[in-house]
Amino acid sequence: MNILEMKNINKSFNGVPVLKDVNFSVEKGEIHALLGENGAGKSTLMNILTGVIPLDSGEVIFEGEHIENQAIKKRQELGIAFVHQELNLFNDLKVYENIFLGKEYVNRFGTLKKKEMIQKSKELFERLRIEIDPTAEVSTLKVSEKQLLEISKSLFFSAKLLILDEPTTALSNDEIEHLFIILRRLRDEGKSIIFISHKMPEIFTISDRYTVLRNGMFIQSGKITDATPEEVTRLLVGASYSTLEIYQKRKLGNVVLELKKFSGEGFKKINLTVRKGEILGLTGLKGSGSSELMNAIFGTQPAQSGSIFVFDKPIKNGSIHVAMKAKMALLPSNRKENSVIPDMSLLENMYVAEHTLSALNFHINYSKELNKFYNYKEMLGIKCNKPSYGITSLSGGNQQKVFLARWLNTEADILLLDNPTQGIDVGAKAEIYKLILNLAEQGKTILINTLEIPELQKIADRCAVFYNGEIIKILQHDEIDEETVMMYSTQAIGGHEDGENQ
Amino acid sequence: MVKTNDNKILKYVSATWSGYSFIFIFFIIFLIYYISNGGITWNGVMNILRHTSVIGIIALGMGIVVITGEIDLSVGSTLALVGGYSVIIFNMTDSIIVTLIFAIVFGLICGLLNGVLVGVTKIPSFIVTLATMLIFRSLSQYSCKILNPELTGGTNSVYKIINTLSSFDLFYKFGNGILFTIPVTGIFLILVTVLFIYISTRTKFGKKLYAVGSNAGAARLSGIQVNLFRVIVFGLSGAMVGLAAFLWIAMNASIDPATTGKSYEMYAIAAVVIGGISMSGGRGKCIGILFGAMSYTVIDKIIVALAVDSLINDTIKGVILIVAMLMQTLSPIIKEKMKVRKLKEL
């Protein structure tokens, strides 16, 4: 029997369809894996289910009742609970206070019945066989405990359908095991669970059925026992893409960047050598360590052990300034947070990084800076009116070009690009690929961290695939395709190599 | 078509308004003074400049602190402490130059203390400078009480310059003198303002002030050593207070550790805010601070001209501060409303 049925769901944002006639159903007492790449429409579908965003057309039936027009709160009362990736807990409150937040037990005078609430929380944890102290402060809990707390909280208010959005990203293997035991027990009690994840081994251990979405369309549903990880990955990725053939093999120079047993928060024992003029892709699922590695190379995050050699010279790790002097540059991910200086003009946003290198040369020579700006404007094809305009007046792609100019302006030889095409439209993306190839042609060495494999396919000479903080495979240009990369990064096929792979 | 033309003018006015509202505010206040005083002489205008010099220089230092997104509450107490010890140094050495250097260096040290606590230990600047505000004031009062009266100029409650010293006349003349009809201390204020305008608009250091205040995270990722930067900025603010303390003793020949510089942190912050600098950092012009500080001096003069009770003084200053803030916060809201209305018309 289906506890949930979503039929012919359509949704578009600003005229761009993101869900097209999607069908999705969950049975009572099953764990259902919902699969799809970034942008496939998973979160939109779940947001429609929980009522966060309205649908354009279609039906949502929960326990035989139409709930399309119900408010978020009403749906929660009916028993739909969303356990978010960023946990919605209050760190400064105690465990039981979090559970009862907004629904506290009070006596006639409005004072809290603490004892009763603590007792109820205890009973709840005992029933689920979870060991959490109800009076502990949430900030002292481990991530896995927080996750379990969030799940328990929704169950306390009689949730019947739990939505878990990538619940295992921050958990260790033991913790995942524990979570799975609890999920199975809940399933056997008749609860239904929608499990959103990328990781094939997990999906194949825990789920009963699966549904694949791609580009906002329903692709396939089925029993997990009837499928193999390879098949599902293929469904996920779809037919091959029209690859824009802009890649050309280049002659590479000497080794310019070398990592030896480089370890830090989120990655461990990375051995890697990169040659002058090379474009190296780094990829892996979120939290697999590629972005952390990039940040540690540039010194924005401290490394724990190992060493970095740039042009054969060892680099003292942990200082951005030292990295910049060694001719490295990092274009960070999360443009708005880490790159945009919102109160400053385009020109100022461009020259700020170079000025930290030439700080002792106190005076700003405006005509020189303007010349440089116009040079980069032409070279990178920045579309803007005046250099004195605010950075926020530009589109995402043009902003990113300004920040690329910011780093080229430092005359860096090694460019670390962390998710450079995040939130940029397709046309601008293609331009940025071309720029990256041109830069490599001019002898710049480029490392790109991205989750979008088609990007790497177009530009990367090699691609290092990360899993759990380690480089699990290095693919040569001809070997890079979405399916292969996905299989390694989801561990659908095993394979473990030492990172050193020329 | 008339409509678009209208909008253009409106846009232009609102752009000038949001960038230079401090000039409007100053001129409105100045006009009130003009009327209440029944006209004004050149000397009257120069007097405004003279009386703004100490608070103006302090406010400029405060301005760069605020631009980086921090605050310095200790400036008033620093003035009392540095001023007091500078009097002692003058009494000991009888040298104007040594006193000037001492005042600036001692102010710098006080500021660096704030800076290290903010930049390195990461205690919020509000708390750090609140603490040093108490400490500096108390140290100034305590030293005045226990030190040899010969050093403090004969009393145990006020630091007083000994007026029999050979450099005294020159020093006093410097503090109260006039050069080409412009008061010397006023010239100092103008020079410091020009210097700050230059630093904030034409130097790499100045641009980094804005970058740190606008988005400290992105500034760090651009290679700016944000913590070190904070230390320097507080140090500069302290050095400015040192210079202001030097001017103060030149003008008044004494420092009362209990009252000198009292509430000056508030006046300085008010001058900065009226001058159009955003309290959250990253935005504003140093020229605004001069106008903000002068606005407050003119209010003092209006009170004298109207012969009202001087106790009402702070009420008026407080009201003006709120009005100035409203002008700045309301203008984007009104702009937004106009935009929505335009969209609705479409």
Image (cartoon, rainbow, N blue to C red):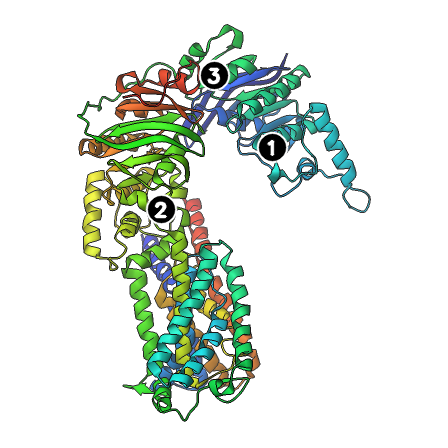
Camera-near label (2 vs 1) is 1
Instruction: Tell if the residue under mark 2 belongs to the same chain as the one under mark 1.
Output: yes
Among all residues in the image, which is located at the extreme bottom? B164
| Circle 1 chain | A
Q: Earlier in the sequence, mark 1 or mark 3?
A: 1
Instruction: Quickly name the residue at label 2.
Output: A392
Residue B227, disc: none
Q: Position of residue A417 (x, y in %)?
A: 32, 35
Is B209 situated left or right of A367 in this image? right
| Circle 2 chain | A
Q: Callout 3, which amino acid?
A: Met
**Quarter holding residue A100:** top right
Is there any visible trace of residue A393 in the rendered image? no
Instruction: Quickly name the residue at label 1.
Output: A146
State the SS at label 3. Answer: helix
Mark 1 crowd level (few <14, some 14–19, many ≥20, 10 Å Cα): many
Is A389 situated left or right of A149 in this image? left
State the SS at label 2. Answer: helix
Query: Against B12, is A262 above or below?
Result: above
Q: Callout 1, which amino acid?
A: Lys
Instruction: Quickly name the residue at label 3.
Output: A200
Is A170 situated left or right of A66 in this image? left
Mark 3 crowd level (few <14, some 14–19, many ≥20, 10 Å Cα): many
Is there any visible trace of residue A267 in the rendered image? yes
